[in-house]
Image (tube, helix red, strand yellow):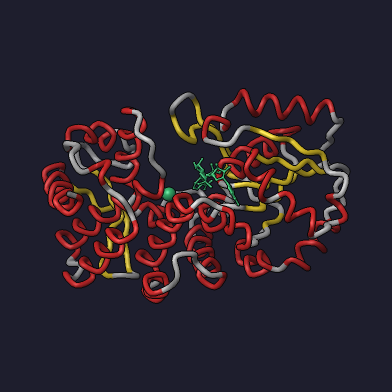
Amino acid sequence: MRNTEFKSFFDFDQFKQKMANLNATRHFIIVDSNTLEHCLPQLDLMAIPSLQDAELIEVEPGEQSKTIEVCSGIWKTLLEADADRKSAVINLGGGMITDLGGYVAAAFKRGIRFINIPTTLLAMIDAAIGGKVGINLDHHKNQIGHFADAELIWVHPSFLKTLPDRELISGKAEMYKHGLIADASHWGELMNGDRIPDTEQIFNSIRIKLGIVETDQRESGNRKLLNFGHTIGHALEAWAHQVGYDTRHGEAIAAGMMVESLLSKDILGLSKNELIEIQQVMLLNYDFSLWKSLSFDDIMPYLLKDKKNESERVNFTLLHSIGNSSIDHFIAPDLIKSALSKTQEMWR
Ligand SMILES: NC(=O)c1ccc[n+]([C@@H]2O[C@H](COP(=O)([O-])OP(=O)(O)OC[C@H]3O[C@@H](n4cnc5c(N)ncnc54)[C@H](O)[C@@H]3O)[C@@H](O)[C@H]2O)c1
Ligand SMILES: [Zn+2]
């Protein structure tokens, strides 16, 4: 599927029609217990004829299901149900389900078609689009996977009505990121809009992500723009998981965006007013107490492990201004340490 077809992602009639045109021999819907409870009934109500006799495959919710063991269980179910190469997998869930189900489909019989119906904000604007699928290996995230495009994607923002607020706001961090790296008016709309993003805002985030991905399918250049907030964010997330703190990806990314915005001011001259605007939005929406007292040494090992680094200098995507960013800024640890501790003062 070409990424520019994304306008049709929101069109239910087109989705229904394309589902019929798939001519799949069998349909398998992968859900977790939450999407089984909250999202499947909505799908049933919409009466998509080709899904009427679909087989349901349920996995436990949460990141612990993104494993080869769970895949193996699903592959056995598919085999026992005589799934063939013309069968289709429908992923009804958040990023965990779209990553897992996409991986299952991409590997089964050398690849069967999969359809993504994202039900979290993060999956709608990030995980379910852009062609990456995968699973974790022990505690190493997303280490096993493929580039594989969904045959079809249907984005239905009504699913967000039952999504817990913490998941919603975590997913919204990636939308703020989209505005910061590529579109000042998207940032402005989010900043002044309601807590739950509207369809137009979701649409704009998808447009920005796919616009970037399309120029760099294999993540060798421009796609690194999407890493804004993630160099620090991933290190904070890895540290939190290691010490056993409960955190969400977007919460770590929001913290990462604060630190990396300060670096953007130091290195690229991001204006003071814009820096303050970014800091205020993050402080208003996220709780950073988890990270207020960690030391730079706690996260340094994770920062240095990044394969995009050059010797001891760490690779960042930074902002010139809100809506304008660039990749490959290599920064020495001293400067990062100072940006982290200055930002931590705001977290107290
Ligand atoms: N492939 C990619 O490009 C990409 C990009 C970003 C993230 N990811 C992956 O996405 C995953 C995180 O995705 P996520 O944040 O969507 O998490 P998730 O899929 O675990 O969903 C979060 C929680 O919300 C529940 N849920 C989902 N939809 C719901 C709904 N409509 N109502 C009520 N509850 C609902 C889930 O059961 C789960 O408990 C990670 O594994 C991450 O690695 C992948
Ligand atoms: Zn992210």
Q: Quadrant of the N terminus?
A: bottom right
Against 17, is 345 above or below?
A: above
| Left or right of 58 in this view: 210 | left
| Left or right of 217 in this view: 10 | right
When asked about the image quadrant of residue 57, the answer is top right
Between 48 and 316, the one lying in front of the other is 48
Across the whole image, how many numbered discs are drawn on residues? 0
**Residue 138 appears in the picture as rendered:** yes
When asked about the image quadrant of residue 3, the answer is bottom right
**Residue 222 appears in the picture as rendered:** no
Residue depicted at 30% across the width and 33% down the height:
239
Against 229, is 183 above or below?
A: below
Residue 336 position within the rendered picture, expressed as x and y whole percent measured from the top left: 17, 46
Between 136 and 157, the one lying in front of the other is 157
Residue depicted at 53% across the width and 70% down the height:
198
| Left or right of 21 in this view: 191 | left
Residue 235 position within the rendered picture, expressed as x and y whole percent measured from the top left: 30, 39
Residue 262 position within the rendered picture, expressed as x and y whole percent measured from the top left: 19, 58
Between 327 and 181, the one lying in front of the other is 181
Residue 86 position within the rendered picture, expressed as x and y whole percent measured from the top left: 83, 42
Residue depicted at 73% across the width and 46% down the height:
90
Residue depicted at 21% across the width and 66% down the height:
275
Quadrant field for ligand 1: top right
Against 6, is 301 above or below?
A: above
